[in-house]
Image (tube, rainbow, N blue to C red):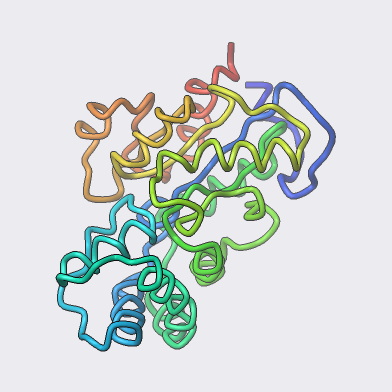
Amino acid sequence: MAALSATHRSGDRPSSDSRRLLVLWDIDHTLLSAGPVSRGAYADAFVHVTGRELVHLADMAGRTDLHITQETLRLHGLEPTDEAVRGIMAELLPAFLRRHHELLRDARPLPGAAGAVRALATARHVVQSVLTGNLHATTHLKLAAVGLAGPDIDLAVGAYGDDHRDRERLVPLARSRAAAAYRTDFGGRRTVVIGDTVHDVSAALAGGASVVAVATGRADAAVLAAAGAHAVLPDLADTAAVLAAIRTVSGAED
């Protein structure tokens, strides 16, 4: 209990502390629902770069934007060359900005998300960031749209969908960034990934991290448990249950 009590804000970046935890949030369907804006942005970017209408969008659940872009090109019979992928990725942010009014209209935080983030922000020894398939810039837009952008979540030490195609490569990257910023080794169980897909689970396990899964996306609790999640919650509505799960999987209560 002690490791998740008392006060400290994650954005303060205090000195090294071997008891510290790094909590990495997935964004879509874990903290928030953004509505159809992502598909619309992809459609805009795709036609801008290829001159063709978007007919098929690759499965987005738990995937990085790099992966989604490559697979979407293949679904249209197009070679995912570096030029084509870079072109679409470069157009995604402008497309999101053109549709920002849709994001503000449709995006909503999921039940308990704001409470969980606030509780962890005042918890001792906890650093919060993100592990998401979104671009860094669109992550900020989505979080801001639902009131979750700010010092409670340190986006500078997260890992994103434009960092690497494979989500499994993101945990070491976020851990390295956080270690450099906070002068702390967040190795092993001291990094906790929270997400809603089997890809969040597999990324955490590949990086040797702990994982708390929430059944707020397409995968139900049984699927997430079978994928290897160390704890599974129905959602984030019960803040005490979220904190307890993080304590248990990280060994903070040992």
**Residue beneath the point at 44% across and 60% down:** 134
| Quadrant (top left, top right, bottom left, bottom right) of the N terminus | top right
Q: x, y (%) of residue 214?
A: 35, 40
Q: Which image quadrant is residue 102 in?
A: bottom left
**Residue beneath the point at 58% across and 49% down:** 158
**Residue beneath the point at 78% across and 26% down:** 17
Q: x, y (%) of residue 122?
A: 70, 42
Image height of 91 relative to 193, above or below: below
Image height of 108 relative to 52, above or below: above
Q: Residue furthest right?
A: 15
Image height of 181 relative to 183, above or below: below
Q: x, y (%) of residue 21?
A: 63, 30
**Residue beneath the point at 61% across and 43% down:** 119
Q: Is residue 206 left or right of residue 43?
A: right
Q: Is residue 23 left or right of residue 17?
A: left
Q: Is residue 165 left or right of residue 97?
A: left
Q: Which image quadrant is residue 225 in?
A: top left
Q: Residue furthest top?
A: 254
Observer-nearest residue: 56 or 195? 56
**Total count of labels:** 0
